[in-house]
Image (cartoon, rainbow, N blue to C red):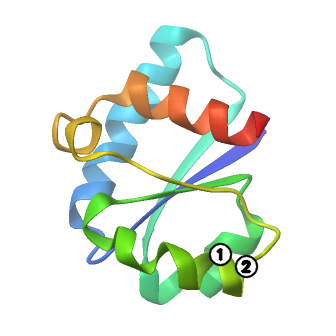
């Protein structure tokens, strides 16, 4: 099971995004993924357990500090379009590219 963590400021929009990712994962036959969403304030709890961390565009300015704090984690920033359109398939593709490195 691969854990994909969505990290944002307040957690409101990423909670909705998890549902869309689960739907897209089913459609694409990606049963090996587990999706979670949390706020940046709870990063210490969730980031170490994630295979990939996808950062919401509104907090991308914190990417550098996240990478320094969690040097072993794999991070990518969701672009505004995929995030705003709640494009589950594009976000899963981004997660896969990030995991592959």
Position of 65 compared to 74: left or right? left
Q: Secondary structure at mark 2?
A: loop
* Of 8 and 80, the residue lying toward us: 80
Position of 46 compared to 71: left or right? left
Name the residue at the right extreme: 72
Task: Residue 76: give its label.
Answer: none
**Above or below 82: residue 65:** below
How far, Cα to Cα, is label 2 from label 1?
A: 5 Å
Instruction: Give the quadrant of the N terminus.
Output: top right
Q: Circle 1 sits on which residue?
A: 67
Q: Residues within 10 Å of mark 1 (few under 14, many from 20)?
A: few
Q: Secondary structure at mark 1?
A: helix
Task: Residue 70: give its label.
Answer: 2
Q: How many marks?
A: 2
The residue at 50%/17% (across/down) is 26
Could you tell me residue 6's position as x and y percent? Answer: 46, 57
The residue at 73%/40% (across/down) is 99
**Above or below 93: residue 55:** below
* Of 94 and 42, the residue lying toward us: 94
User: Do the residues under discs 2 and 1 have CB atoms within 8 angstroms?
Assistant: yes
The residue at 39%/48% (across/down) is 78
* Of 53 and 15, the residue lying toward us: 53
**Which quadrant would residue 101 be assigned to in this image?**
top right
Position of 59 compared to 38: left or right? left
Could you tell me residue 70's position as x and y percent? Answer: 73, 79
**Which quadrant would residue 13 be assigned to in this image?**
bottom left
């Amino acid at each position: 099971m691969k854990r994909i963590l969505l990290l944002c400021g307040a957690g409101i929009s990423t909670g909705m995004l998890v549902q869309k990712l689960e739907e897209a994962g089913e459609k694409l036959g990606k049963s090996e993924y587990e999706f979670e969403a949390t706020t940046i304030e709870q990063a210490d709890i969730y980031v170490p357990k994630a295979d990939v961390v996808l950062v919401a565009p509104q907090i991308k300015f914190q990417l550098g500090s996240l990478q320094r704090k969690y040097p072993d984690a794999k991070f990518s920033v969701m672009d505004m379009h995929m995030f705003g359109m709640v494009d589950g398939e594009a976000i899963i593709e981004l997660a896969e590219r990030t995991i592959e490195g």
